[in-house]
Every structure is written in structure tokens, then in C-alpha cells.
Image (cartoon, rainbow, N blue to C red):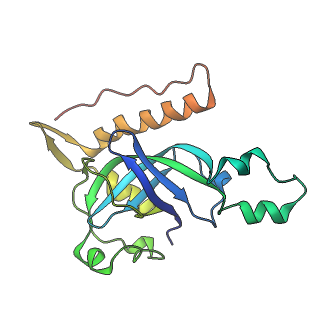
Amino acid sequence: MRRLLGVVTRGSLTEGLEMKLAEDCSIEDIKAGKFVVIEGDKLRFFSLITDLRLDATTPAVLQNPPDVSDDLVREVLSGTATYATVTLKPMLTTERDETERGEGRGARDGADEDKMPERREPQPVKTVPPHFSPVYEATSADVLAFSAARKWNRKGVSFTSAHLWTWILPFAWTYIGSLRGATGFSAKRAPAKLS
């Protein structure tokens, strides 16, 4: 079963998207470098979590934080006056099936991950999903759907999606390494063999 993490609230193609974290998700369970799937109206966006941020609806809440021992006040403020946002970087996109489009947003919530419908070829991201598109934790079926070795042809150069992963995964590992402040952390990309 797919886990709903939140909804897209704002963003741009170049700077990434912001997701408001669902109330039942803990910010501590969300990790940078994790893959997620955004279900747009027409497209599915395979994305990477790149940043996490704590926000508040008003600065006054942050100027007078509740007492550490006052769990009730912290619970009341959490999710209403204070909330978490997650920055997402869309990496690939595919068209949704006709049956999924007809069911509307959120219809895949709770869908069996082993019975995923066939997907069209993954493409580079050239648009953004609409406001309030649901964001789900990527399942193994989602990863397979986006990473199956298929032939692509971009600007006259033919390559497989496996080659594309040699570009995406090092970005993810390098980004994670920069977050951790690791010294000597490197993710060297093996040169892709174009066929």
C-alpha cells in the first residue's frame, strides 16, 4: 500500500516543488535523498526529496515557543500554527493511464503496489503538477516503472534509462553527502556507453 506523504503547495520547474507534509507523517521519518511519486492530473512525477524545512503561519509562534514539558500546547500548535515543508526535485515523468485519469486525484491511495498498470516511456520533466497534487512514498514498483531499461531517443542520441540512472543516482548521493557535511564523500558517475 502506498503511503501518502503530503500535497504539493507551490514551486517551479527550475527551483523544485514544495510539499506540505501530511499531519500523520513525522518530519523525522522523511529523509533527504528519498524517492517519491507525485500524482498529477495527467502525469506522474518521479521525484527526489532535496530539503526539509520547519515553518510557522506567524512569527509570533516562534518568538514565544511552548514550554518543553507542555505536550498539549505543542500538539495543538503542530500542524496548525507550525508545520513542515519538503522540497522536491522532479526527475522523470510518465503519462498516467486512462483509468487512473478517470478516477481522479487520490484514487490510487491504498492501491496494491504489485498491480501497477503499464507505464509509457519515462521522459525528462518539462512541466509541474497542479496545486494540491498528492505525493506518495515511491514503492519498488514505482522505481521499476521509472528505471526499466528502455531505449530513449533525445536529440538524436539513443540511450537507455539505465544510462539516465547513472546521472540521477550520483546527484542524489552527492546531494546527501553535502547535507551530511561528509568529507571525501564522492559519487563518481561511470561514463554511459551510448549505443
159 or 135: which is nearer to us?
A: 135
In the current view of this chain or complex, which residue is farthest to the right? 69
In the current view of this chain or complex, which residue is farthest to the front? 60
Q: Which residue is rendered at x = 65% and y = 63% of the image?
A: 80
150 or 3: which is nearer to us?
A: 3
Q: Is residue 31 above or below residue 111?
A: above
- Can you tell which quarter of the image residue 111 is in? bottom left
4 or 157: which is nearer to us?
A: 4
Q: Which residue is rendered at x = 62% and y = 62% of the image?
A: 25
Instruction: Give the position of the C terminus as an image quadrant.
Output: top left
In the current view of this chain or complex, which residue is farthest to the left? 156
Horizontal and vertical percent position of residue 92: 31, 49
Q: Is residue 167 above or below residue 32?
A: above
Horizontal and vertical percent position of residue 162: 30, 43
Horizontal and vertical percent position of residue 101: 27, 74
Residue 138 visible in image: no
Q: Which residue is rendered at x = 40% and y = 55% of the image?
A: 143
Apparent side of residue 84 relative to residue 12 in the rendered image (left or right): right
Q: Which residue is rendered at x = 64% and y = 51% of the image?
A: 58
Horizontal and vertical percent position of residue 1: 51, 72
Apparent side of residue 2 relative to residue 23 in the rendered image (left or right): left
Apparent side of residue 151 relative to residue 47 in the rendered image (left or right): left
